[in-house]
Image (cartoon, coloured by chain):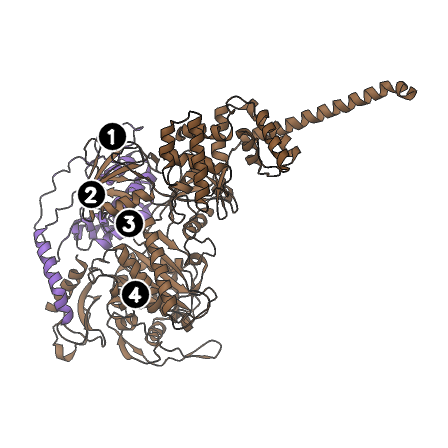
Amino acid sequence: MITWQRKLPSLVAVLVVSACAVPPPYRAPAPPAPVPPPTQEPPVETRPAPAPEPPVEQPPPPAPVVREPVLSAASRALVSQAQIQLQSKNYPVAASSIERALRIEPDNPLLWIELGKVRQAEGNYVQAENMGRKAASMSVNAPRANSSAWTLIAESLRARGKNSEAQEALLRAQGVR
Amino acid sequence: MRALKKYRKQIFAGVALAFGVAAIAFTVWVFTLDRKITSQFEGRRWTLPAQVYAQPTELYVGQTFSAETLEQDLQRLGYQRVDKPQHPGSYSRKGTRIDLINRRFQFWDALQEPQLLTIKTNGNAVEDLRNGRNEEVPIFRLDPLLIGSIFPIHGEDRVVVTPEEVSQLLPSALKVVEDRKFDTHWGVNPTAIMRAAFVNLRAGAIEQGGSTLTQQLVKSYFLDNRRTIGRKIEEAIMAMLLEVHFSKQDLMNAYINEIYLGQDGQRAIHGFGLASQFYFGKPLAELQLHEVALLVAIVRGPSYYDPRRHPQRARERRDMVLKLMAEHGVIAPDMANKAAKRPLGIVSSGSQAGGGYYPAFLDLVRRTLRRDYREEDLTEAGLRIFSTLDPTVQTQAEKALTQELDRLDKTRKTKSKAPLEGVVVVTAPQNGEVIAMVGGRQASFAGFNRALDAKRSIGSLVKPVIYLAAIESGQFNAASIVEDGPVSVKLANGQLWEPKNISEQYYGPVPLVRALAQSMNLATVNLGMSVGLPKVTREFVALGLEKEPPQLPSVLLGSLDVSPLEVAQLYNAFANGGFSTPLRAVRSVLDTEGKPLKSFALEVTPVASPDAVYQVNRMMVEVIEHGSGRGARAQIPPDVVVAGKSGTSSDYRDSWFAGFSGSHLAVVWIGHDDNSPTGLTGSSGSLPVWSRLMANLGTTSWSAPLPESLEETWIEFPTGLGARPDCGEEPIAIAVPKGTELPMQPSCGTNVFGEFGEKAKEWWRGITRQ
């Protein structure tokens, strides 16, 4: 009884806040702007081109509360920097850019997915899958992010020839959407 | 006489031969010296200890950072406060706005060029971040703090500078004070030698040296302080040989990097580059006139003119250097007067950059790298090492430990001759980076590294591992009832093992969550035995313990010797939601040229069911809310969700607390080095350190989302019976697998999973602000 009353004001506050602040839907990180000459390190200030319009919103499922993660401006800059580094096959540097973002937002499943993609690109499918699993465990209330996580898991499993497990993962990726 | 005449020829020949042999011997000797000195000069001129950097401060909009903390950061980096920043390493502050020009720095992934940055803060967060062209900057990192170097024991430490990094003032001052004929002499200065010889003759002892800079350089190369005539001649010849082979500029540069300028315990401070860090906490290029003059003053006698121990002496000599510089036209007289009015400006030895001050952490760095590099590569090859240390967290950890240990020493009932010792290890749970490590009460004392080497009994810290094994077995949940009653296990040697609770009481049937929260020994032994010892010991290995514990019942009560760092590794798997990530102290290693050699990438491995880990973590939250960790709330605000577990070994020899929030994991150990009893439990000793640290870090809530397969429900904490938030004794919310049916507290009705399940969820969301 006492506990409940003590927590009530903060609960009300949370409900009010969440009612006002509808989180914007996750936008996929934009494709990098035209690639600069290779000698020129992309400056940190690089900002992504405006993201494409998100696909038409589906009616949100009634419950539970959906909270799709979004990247902060700092993370967005680091992710697009990583994507440029990835194009020049500079995997350790690309990974370290994502790791920088992860230090700022360790709970953002999108960043774990991005890091998984770097591992995937360099052929480290075990870590790619693990990053996917980490992202999946963090995105139970975020169907889109969860679906991307399972897609990454499925792709990583397939790359290792684990086709039936990959199929299962793919079903989860489609199922949660 | 006649005989002399008779043998004149032979004598002449003999003398000529002797001269010839002597001349040849001399020539050979000179050649040997020549080879020795030139190879010393040309070969690897200096052995360069690896330099270790802390993690850089990242600036971005939204970051929790007040102008105050940013300014502290800049001061720690040796940035100079000015009215308007004009050069790298300076900043200005107007209220909540800071303008700065960063230093040029080669990171492992990019070169950061100096630029003007304007940071506007609002209360506790960065609100706006722009560059000199008024463009928004999404993220920017400052040059990292140099926290130390890996130098040989009793060895030379130095930071080598190129001529471009040296202000012209320094060579000029050196010449004026040490060797006025430097630009023209050929290695030795006969007038100076004569003058010195005269002084020494009059004093009857060697009082004054007439050494040129070149001679001092030679002397320093071969580390020989004997002042014999033979030695002097050898030195003079070598100096002349150096002058033949190398330009004056090369020699001056060598001198600046070579010369001995101070002592820091076992570490010899060599070269002006490191001396600048050691005394002023900033790069040589940024020194002002009075600071340059002080370093030049120290050259003559680093111990005699030690500005920390003999500030008055050092100051007098500094002012004399300034006077000489003015007299010889290096600087204007009014500049000298102005500089002479400045204080010495020495950073205190505790806060200084230049290292040696985080010995426990540096030791971890060194051990990490020893797997991949030879000792010589670390101490000689000039590697640049980017570590994970967060200086702010480190400072907080040191403070929390010393303050609480001082308090405990005063109030403890069990008096002991030796003071208490302690360890703190802090990690960032999601990426496994070790961000702080305190190896003892005197954090800056390099000795036995308790954080790594003190393997001590961890007591009840083992319990969450047992509860995890139980939940993973599928036979238990947080509300399952276990019996806290007499235990008697027959051991392999035939003896009976009959453990007790710390309180020496029996609590009867209790729910798992209470048994863990209140750290009940007998309930835990019963639980562990029914899960099975092999399952439990394997769980330790899965979570990251290197060696599997023996399958003995006593392991269930933590008779298991583990170091604080290993505990951190174990608990990190809980904090990271069932994913293990090897703890890291190093991010990457660059060679002298700035080429990346190695990076320690973030790796995660699923090691336990995330759902089971979530359930145990929720139970560890109850340790803080209702159990042995309640004391934490004296420091940590009620809306910050944290989880943890206390541990006490038998006879109160070891006091432990390990726990985590959303952003930090910390392990604290307190005990005596001789393993004698402390009279402290985990809750009375280590918990206060842990909670003080967590509170001072302003840490964030643990807020993992509820896994899909679980749901929330209310139970009575004492009985484990289903309850409602407004009904039953001490109702608490727990996470259980969906569809779990619990016997209801009769007075609370039966509807647990409808309305009240939702309420539980809302309550949880309320406190975790999901």
Whole-number angstrom distance, CA of label 1 to CA of label 3: 27 Å
Q: Residue B720, located in which quarter of the rendered image?
A: bottom left
Q: Confirm or deny contact between disc 2 and disc 4 (CB under 8 A).
A: no
Check disc 2 and report the residue beneath it: B95
Q: Residue A94, located in which quarter of the rendered image?
A: top left
Left or right? Give the position of B455 relative to B90: right
Between residue B567 and residue B151, name the one nearer to us: B151
Which chain appears purple?
A
Q: Residue furthest front?
A: B202
Q: Position of residue B596 (x, y in %)?
A: 39, 37
Task: Let me know if marks 1 and 2 both belong to one chain.
Answer: no
Q: Position of residue A90 (x, y in %)?
A: 33, 36
**In this picture, is B301 found above or below B678?**
above
Which chain appears brown?
B
Residue B581 visible, this angle: no
Q: Position of residue B153 (x, y in %)?
A: 52, 47
**In this picture, is B630 found above or below B123?**
below
Residue at (10% x, 50% y) in the render: A22
| Residue A35: assigned label | 1
Check disc 3 and report the residue beneath it: A131
Check disc 4 and report the residue beneath it: B472
- In the rendered structure, which amino acid carries the disc numbered 3? Met
- Label 1 lies in what chain? A
Whole-number angstrom distance, CA of label 2 to CA of label 4: 55 Å
